[in-house]
């Protein structure tokens, strides 16, 4: 263990209680960006973050948007000879329903068996928290920051970062950086250090199918009125081929293979049985012709994320509803363009709707382009070195399945090289009930960030 | 117009305001049987009915069940030489959601353009109300009832009458009757008098499909986990052939054609364009090889009445849910047996579920057998005569599409001939937002009942 790593490891252990207490405060803010009633909680969280960033000797700015605000913080004293790093985090979290499946209250963080359970414990408050704690620790050790540090924490990642994309164009000067570090990503498993080779993009659609102009009694109209729920099932059942591939014509046309360089050290080991056991199923899905980690990170998907219509409460109601609804999303890989893919989807679904129905599509949940990292930068070198040090194992490359809407905008606006990193693993249940993060991985994240920040200026 | 009809017509007109005020009181009780929070409203409604029936010089009994109570009323003084008629009605109503599609509050009855809008305005409080009002009018005119009258008003028709079927076996003596009159049925349109040739049966299932043991992030698991919403759509899309028929093997095997006698005067005129306009669609559904009124009343169906799973609130959540749900129902015609058909359904759906899913089926919403009326009874003759008098047109036969779960049990327990009648028409929006009944049809119903009751003892 190098002396710096040893120092930060001891520092984390000795300050653990105070760190946890701070972390729990942060987790208690109900910062659900999708639901407008949580605006006051978001404002309170921004105040809390502002104080915390100021306590780290950073100058802060709050960037208002028509949605939820961003908070930006920077030091101004490292010197022009030092690299400038923009770190991207987000304070917003996913909704908590179905809330009855949580074993502990989602906004009352609970430490059980070395794991912290709470909405956001991993995504992204957990990853944000160890990042800020590590930066503070570096400052306390050195008395100053060894880099020009810029931190951008946004509040709309879980709803597509629609406003941030405008903000970073407007604040081009402020976000200018040599490197962008997105700390919101995964490693393949808890024993495998890896930085992210690519992140899938996304486009979404909310589908409304209108049949009759009012709900109807299925006894009186059953047999003569075409039931919108039946039609929706029929339409959505036609989006996958028997081999698991997506039927949308042209869907796969723009996909580019990984470069030979990117394929080097690419982590593709995967035990299907472990996944089956973890999620409790006897059979998996997806494209039969690809391996699981390819399907998860390097192949696009079409998923139904929500489906509803008719009578869904206690008891029974024999209704033929007027409306049937679905929320669907498509994960995208380079070089699929979200808007182009959306057009293909739109054309396809229109061709599938039976006569007599009115289709409405809403794609206002912001699309995000797919991202592929470049590995020949100093920031990639520093991150790879830091992971290797902390895990005592060579750092791999990993293709993440999730989407980070702002990646491409940050790259363009900052002018810097972007890498995505993190210590999340798939069983952390992000976006699901009982989201959690192991305390041991919080420490790993803290150590990786501190090592990276100390290493970067020396390269 | 015969003198008795003229008398009752004048009586209705002169008492209209008091009748409406009474009717509105009845409609204000939120007697939704499917939702347990309305139990106190149901108890209050029972008290109201009890007083009203006692004011009609009837002796009342409340029959408790493990669900909602029934109220029973009878006179005991007509004499053994007079026919005994059991009239079946129900005080419970359907849930009101989606409540935002109502133009007026569902439990604040409103008279607009000659129609009374409220949940239950037609089904069955409206039909029950004119029946009781007509019986009271006959009593007031004659000073006594010309028949032995038994009235049974139940509270679980909209949830399948599961308890009433036991009650009528237990109360066999009380429900013994020469004739059973079910006033909960339809006429083909407002200009066509008709009594009901048959009523479809029903069986239902609540389907739960479990995939992964928890909700998952569609970015991390999309492409490797088989999405339960996709699987449910795929399964439910396989229940209809391209010609609109149901795919369940053996589904149609037990169906018996109408007898030549039943086909006589059977009303089958139907303008598809009127229906299309009424429900606002450009194309209809159902079996292509049958005419609309055959499809509505004489053919069985398979319908999805509710469908839900995943994230269905404001905004977007990229989830692969653990569970996908549907409520489905099958309308049945003679001689399809609900339990036999349910077994065929169960076998079929099990054969369609992909590997890796756990299927749970719940058929606790009571099944009901289909019913076919016999037309050679005095009660059918009296009803037919009454419709003809009130409409000044020959009474037809009509095949109703809805289900009356208790029909067969009432026939068996009472030992009497059963007919189903009423003045509902399909555009009354029963079970839907803006349910209503025209005041003119309330008067027609009142006149038909009074004519029938006066005619029956003379045959």
Image (cartoon, coloured by chain):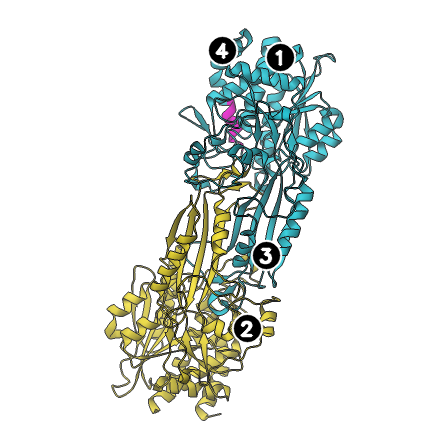
Chain colours: A cyan, B yellow
Q: CA distance from mark 4 to mark 1?
A: 19 Å
Spot occupied by residue B121 in the image (x, y as percentages of width and height):
48, 69
Query: Where B313 falls versus A405 (above or below)?
Result: below
Q: Is residue A125 left or right of residue B44?
A: right
Report helix, strand or loop for mark 3: strand
Cα separation, mark 1 vs mark 2, equals: 80 Å
Dot 4 and dot 1 residues touching (CB under 8 Å): no
What is the quadrant of residue A336 in the picture? top right
Question: Disc 1 or disc 2, which is closer to the eye?
Answer: 1
Q: Is residue B44 above or below residue B21?
A: above
The label on residue B115 is 2
Label 2, residues with CA under 10 Å away: few <14, some 14-19, many ≥20: some
- Which residue carries the number 4 mark? A10
Extent of the magenta region: A22-29
Q: Give the crowd class for mark 4: few <14, some 14-19, many >=20 residues within 10 Å.
A: few
Classify mark 2: helix, strand or loop. Answer: strand
Q: Which numbered marker is on residue A455? A: 1
| Towards the viewer: A150 or B1 | A150
Pinpoint the chain carrying mark 2: B
Q: Secondary structure at mark 1?
A: helix
The total of numbered circles placed on residues is 4
Q: Residue at x 28, y 67 (%)?
A: B167
């Amino acid at each position: 263990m190098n002396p710096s790593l040893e120092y930060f490891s001891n520092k984390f252990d000795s300050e653990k209680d105070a760190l946890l207490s701070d972390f729990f405060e942060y987790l208690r803010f109900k910062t659900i960006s999708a639901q407008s009633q949580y605006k006051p909680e978001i404002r309170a969280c921004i105040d809390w973050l502002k104080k915390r960033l100021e306590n780290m000797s950073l100058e802060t700015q709050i960037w208002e948007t028509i949605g939820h605000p961003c908070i930006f913080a920077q030091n101004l004293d490292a010197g022009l000879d030092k690299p400038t790093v923009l770190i991207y985090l987000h304070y917003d979290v996913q909704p908590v329903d179905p809330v009855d499946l949580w074993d502990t209250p989602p906004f009352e963080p609970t430490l059980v068996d070395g794991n912290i359970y709470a909405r956001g414990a991993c995504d992204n408050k957990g990853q944000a928290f160890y990042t800020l704690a590590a930066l503070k620790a570096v400052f306390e050790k050195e008395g100053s920051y060894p880099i020009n540090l810029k931190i951008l924490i946004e509040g709309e990642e879980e709803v597509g970062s629609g406003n941030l994309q405008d903000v970073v164009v407007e604040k081009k000067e402020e976000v200018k950086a040599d490197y962008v570090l997105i700390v919101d990503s995964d490693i393949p498993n808890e024993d495998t250090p890896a930085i992210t080779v690519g992140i899938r993009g996304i486009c979404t659609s909310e589908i409304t199918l209108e049949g009759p102009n009012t709900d109807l009694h299925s006894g009186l109209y059953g047999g003569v009125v075409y039931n919108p729920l039946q039609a929706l099932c029929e339409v959505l059942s036609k989006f996958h081929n028997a081999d698991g591939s997506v039927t949308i014509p042209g869907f796969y046309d723009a996909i580019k293979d990984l470069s030979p360089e990117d394929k080097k050290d690419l982590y593709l080991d995967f035990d299907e049985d472990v996944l089956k056991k973890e999620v409790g199923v006897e059979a998996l899905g997806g494209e039969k012709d690809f391996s699981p980690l390819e399907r998860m990170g390097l192949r696009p998907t079409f998923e139904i994320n929500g489906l509803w219509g008719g009578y869904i409460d206690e008891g029974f109601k024999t209704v033929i509803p007027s409306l049937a609804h679905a929320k669907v999303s498509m994960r995208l890989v380079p070089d699929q363009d979200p808007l182009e893919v959306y057009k293909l989807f739109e054309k396809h679904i229109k061709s599938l709707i039976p006569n007599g129905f009115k289709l409405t599509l809403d794609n206002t949940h912001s699309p995000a382009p797919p991202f592929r990292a470049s590995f020949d930068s100093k920031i990639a070198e520093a991150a790879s070195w830091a992971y290797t040090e902390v895990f005592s194992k060579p750092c791999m490359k990993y293709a993440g399945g999730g989407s980070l809407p702002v990646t491409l905008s940050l790259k363009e606006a900052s002018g810097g090289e972007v890498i995505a990193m993190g210590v999340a693993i798939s069983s952390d249940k992000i976006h699901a009930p009982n989201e959690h993060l192991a305390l041991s991985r919080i420490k790993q994240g803290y150590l990786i960030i501190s090592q990276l920040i100390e290493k970067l200026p020396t390269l």
